[in-house]
Image (cartoon, helix red, strand yellow):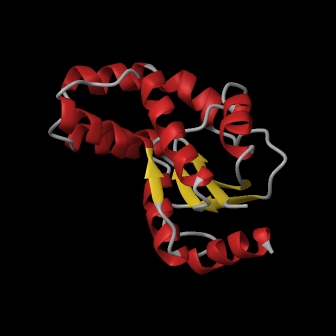
Amino acid sequence: MPLLVLIGGLPGSGKTTLARKLADTLRLPHLNRDTLYSGYHFTTGERLHPQANQELLFSTATGLLDGGVSVVLDMTTYRGEMERDVTAGLLSRAYGILVFTYCEDPRGRFHARMSADPATTPEQVEAQMARWPRTQRLASEPLELDLPLLRVRTEDGYQPGIDAVAEFVRRGIS
């Protein structure tokens, strides 16, 4: 059975950077909601609704998992809202491990990243920041799933380090 390493956390908490490094370390494909969104926009010139973007991410992951390919997937995970979809759509196809990222000021990091992105308008930044209280309430803790869980602090490198995170993943499947 393939492995799904689900990297969750608030926007700006270092999910994608950690996921890329972990995927490289484990030599696994990495799926990211934002990258798929950008790829869709590049191809069609259209913007995906967030629900359609999540469906695209899950269908892409499902295709890999059904093909027997383990994957590292990172996305903002909304506690109390996504457990059913993750369980039915992904964990029915794979053994899962949760890695949850956190840091001191994810809101500031997220705002800085969005503001620096030339493809993001000031209005989009403002709209995202207006949703921050809801996002913080629902995404500041990991999903409630009965899976091995590792919390990773991301302020100054990784605590624990990337090698320890990779070992946690390897131990979780043995």
Q: Position of residue 76 (x, y in %)?
A: 53, 39
The residue that appears at 54% across and 38% down in the rendered structure is 58
136 up-or-down from 154: above or below: above
The residue that appears at 51% across and 68% down in the rendered structure is 28
Instruction: Report the quarter where the N terminus lies.
Output: bottom right
Q: Position of residue 44 (x, y in %)?
A: 20, 30
- Residue 10 appears in view: yes
Q: How many marks?
A: 0
Q: Position of residue 125 (x, y in %)?
A: 29, 27
- Residue 157 appears in view: no
Q: Position of residue 150 (x, y in %)?
A: 72, 60
The outermost residue toward the right is 146
Q: Nearer the viewer, residue 16 or 32?
A: 32
Q: Is residue 72 left or right of residue 172?
A: left
Q: Is residue 145 left or right of residue 57?
A: right
Q: Nearer the viewer, residue 56 or 10?
A: 56
Instruction: Report the quarter where the C terminus lies.
Output: bottom right
The outermost residue toward the front is 67
17 up-or-down from 109: above or below: below
